Every structure is written in C-alpha cells, then in structure tokens.
Amino acid sequence: MKLFNLIWVLALAVAGLACDNWTDQPVVTGCNPGFIINSDGRCERGSIGGSGGSAGTGGSGGSAGSAGTGGTGVGACTNAEDDAVYADLVFTNDDGDTTTGSDAASAIASDCVFGSGLSDPTLRGCADLAGEVVVCAISNTCTPAQVQALSDCVESCMQNAIMEVTGSMLTAECGACYSASVSCSAELCATSGCSNPTSSDCVQCRCDNDCTPGFDRCSGLAPSGACD
C-alpha cells in the first residue's frame, strides 16, 4: 500500500509563504477542546489512537483528543469483503495515472479533498471544508467538529466513488482508517513545509504525529515505508 497518494494535496490551498511564516507565529496560551499543548507550546491533537491505546484496539479508539479512528480494529482492511472491493477497483486521476486496489482507494481519498472533474470516476470533493481546515490549521484554531466534518466528507466521497466503480464499498471500519489519516494530516501537517506534500518535512510530520503509522496499523495493509 503506497500512502503517498494520501500525502496531502491540502498544501495546494496553502501558499508556501504561509507555511514558512508559521514559524514566526506567537506561542498560544490555550487550546480548543480535544487539543493538547505540545513541547513548543502550540496546540495539537493526539496521535491516531491517542493515549488510550494504538489505533484499533477495539475500544473508543483512544482519548477524546485522538484523530477520529472511532472503534476501528487493527487490520480493518484485511478481510474478504474489502479484498473483493480492492480486486475490482480501478481509478484514473486527472493526470491520466491509473492505480488499482488499495492504491486506488488512497488516490481517490486524496483527490476527494478538493475534488476532480477530470478523473475517472469524477469526484465532487470537499473543497469548502478543506479550505476551512487549511485556514484554521495555520492558526491552530481547528475544532474537532471542523476536522471531523472534513473527514466524514472525504470518506463519503471515497466510498461513493468506489461504489460507482465496483458496485460495492469498503467496510465502514476500513473506510474510517482512510478518513482518520486525512484528519490527522489536515490538522497537524498542513503547515509543516507542505507547500510540497512530498517534502521531507511534510513526510516527517505525518510520521512524527502517527498519521502514516496509524493508518498502517488501522488498515493492516503493507506499510509504505515512508517512516522507516
């Protein structure tokens, strides 16, 4: 499973200068509900799965501040039902690049953030919600409700596209792994040098904040190797 397709096109809505200037922003003195103050004195969410346990231990998915894995289980995408969907899944993005299987699901989830009118299938996307999260992420003022709204929209967009192609959808538990990764990356990495989503700082941010490893644990799919 190559998670690079989930490496965040949110950066397309954030000018590189805005990312660079973030380091000059004042340290915050308080956090919104569900956030914690990190070692730099700034607000951030807990890692996927939170302090209550790693993603997918079958309970609540961690503390109240964790990034939306819900009750998904470890290896949520490794079952006969999801395997059958992946076997029939093909996606062509607006650049004409075609992926299949779980890579196609990641590509669809990524393109669902802002939508695509040239892909096959086309994706309506979640541009308004994505833009809102980009703005609040820069100032560390995102509420859990804002992030969850984007996560839910991306998951719905992805599942509808998969249904269009295969006639079925990924299980809810598997789909939640994708949306949790999107939420984690949107909240914590939109300002980490992510004007280039494949930059080392952006990749490292997702690794440090458990976005990529959390997805690997949650889905049970082969790790991308980005955090090795």
Image: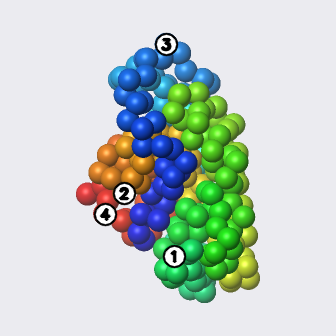
- Residue 111 in view of the camera: yes
- Residue 87, picture quadrant: bottom right
Query: Which label lies toward us, 1 or 4?
Result: 1
Query: How far apart are labels 2 and 3 at the CA level?
Result: 31 Å
Q: Quadrant of the C terminus?
A: bottom left
Say the numbered circle drawn on residue 29.
Answer: 3
Helix, strand or loop for disc 3: loop
Mark 4, Cα crowd under 10 Å, few <14 / some 14-19 / many 20+, is: few
Residue type at mark 2 is Thr
Query: How far apart are labels 1 and 4 at the CA level?
Result: 25 Å
Residue type at mark 1 is Asp
Query: Which label lies toward us, 2 or 3?
Result: 2
Query: How far apart are labels 3 and 1 at the CA level?
Result: 44 Å
Could you tell whether 149 is left or right of 18 in the image? right
Query: How far apart are labels 4 and 2 at the CA level?
Result: 14 Å
| Residue underneath mark 4 | 225
Query: Looking at this rendering, what residue extends furthest in the top direction?
Result: 29
Query: How far apart are labels 3 and 4 at the CA level?
Result: 36 Å
Q: Earlier in the sequence, mark 3 or mark 4?
A: 3
Q: Earlier in the sequence, mark 1 or mark 4?
A: 1
Q: Position of residue 131 (x, y in %)?
A: 63, 44
| Residue underneath mark 1 | 95
Q: Please name the residue shown 67% across and 52% down the image.
A: 127
Helix, strand or loop for disc 2: loop
Query: Which label lies toward us, 2 or 1?
Result: 1
The answer to whether the residue labelled 1 contacts the one labelled 4, judged by CB atoms less than 8 Å apart, is no
Mark 2, Cα crowd under 10 Å, few <14 / some 14-19 / many 20+, is: some
Q: Please name the residue shown 42% across and 43% down the image.
A: 16
| Residue underneath mark 2 | 198
